[in-house]
Amino acid sequence: MKNVMRRRLVIVLVSMGVVLGAVVAWNHIKAHFIAQFMAKNASMPQTVSTAVVHYSTWQPHITSVGSLRAVHGVEVSPQVAGMVVSVDFTSGSYAHAGQALVHLNDTPEVAQLRSLQATAHYDWLTYQRDVSQYKAQAIGKAVLDAATANWKSAEAQRKAEAALIAELTIRAPFNGRLGITTVNPGQYLQAGAAVTALESLDPIYVDFKLPQIDLSRVRVGQTVHVTTSAFPGSVFTGRVTSIDSEVDPATRNFEAEATIANPQRRLMPGMFVDAAVQSGAPRHYLTLPQTAISYNPYGDTVFVVKRGAKSAAKPTVRQVFVTLGPTRGDQVAVLKGLSAGEQIVTSGEMKLKNGTPITVSNSVRPHGKFRAVAQNR
């Protein structure tokens, strides 16, 4: 009986060993196949571009939109009516103060002037003779007074006719660029009819409005940067020269005027511009391209690059929440969430998640530049 019991016990132990071995072997085989499956279905490295977060110095600005206005600008027009004899300028040319632009017919007036000159000369000679005769007591004082009055009246008429002839030549009142004219020789112009525009372009004014909350931040003499879509990439610099004496009660905005140097005369009156008034001391911000930001309802995030422990390992990414500040062009300031020197993904983040391996390719990436004029405060 003892031998039978031993044999049975050995059989049981051997059976249990076989079962346990089978279980262990099955677990090893399962783990092997699972590892193979996970390896086949692991995330492929995603190609992205990256940039290093660094500090930038930004000058605070108060921004607005404005329009340009000439320092001196008029519609040149005749003071008297007349027939156009000649147009002595080219549309769009530059005129100097006093330059003759249009001549009106002055033939009758010149003839009348010569008659008045002769009359005035005769009356002057008569006056001179009467002065001599009065000194010799040959005539009375009344005769001399009449001769004096005749001479002065004739001289006044001569000067009036000469002034009228001068008005028949239309001249530029100041230096500036002429506009386009449709006046032609032979055309009859009424008094006050527009001949052409004359605008003084250097310097030039820019008028812009700001909310009353910024009234304490704007003062005469502050630097102003102006940009316009007509000249992309160009920045025109000037200074605040005047602030209006009242705030518009309808909009609660006040108007400011800046004077901009325009030596090349590229800026023209009536142009729409963006104006930025420098205000306050420069600020230092961590900056990165706006393309690096994933804007979400639950918070704004960026992907930070994590280097692998082994040199051959692919870098991965980690999603981080950030607090954003002001923006300028395609750059945005980061107030919280990042540190200087960290490498962040600037493009391709839509295909990433935490732990995704990446391949960095910076052959094409945001240029990292921004316009000189701020887009917000």
Image (cartoon, grey):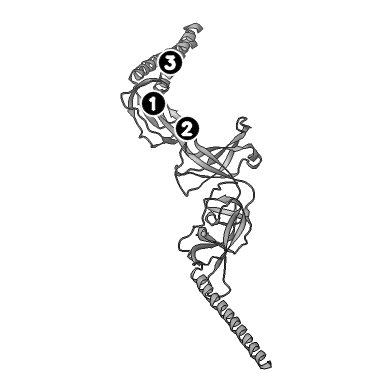
Asked which quadrant contains residue 356, the reply is bottom right
Residue at 63% over, 58% down: 337
In this view of the protein, which residue sits in the foreground, 132 or 206?
206
Residue found at the far bottom of this picture? 3
- In the rendered view, would you say 104 is above or below 137? below
* Residue 4, horizontal then vertical, whole percent: 65, 91
Camera-near label (3 vs 1) is 1
- Which element type, helix, strand or loop, lies under badge 2? strand
**In this rendering, would 165 be left or right of 248?**
left
Residue indicated by mark 1: 169
Type of the residue with mark 2? Gly
**In this rendering, would 252 be left or right of 313?**
right
Residue indicated by mark 3: 157
Asked which quadrant contains residue 193, the reply is top left
- In the rendered view, would you say 87 is above or below 260? above
**Mark 3 burial class by Cα count in 10 Å: few <14, some 14-19, many 20+:** some
Gap in Å between the C-alphas at discs 1 and 2? 20 Å
* Residue 211, horizontal then vertical, whole percent: 61, 37
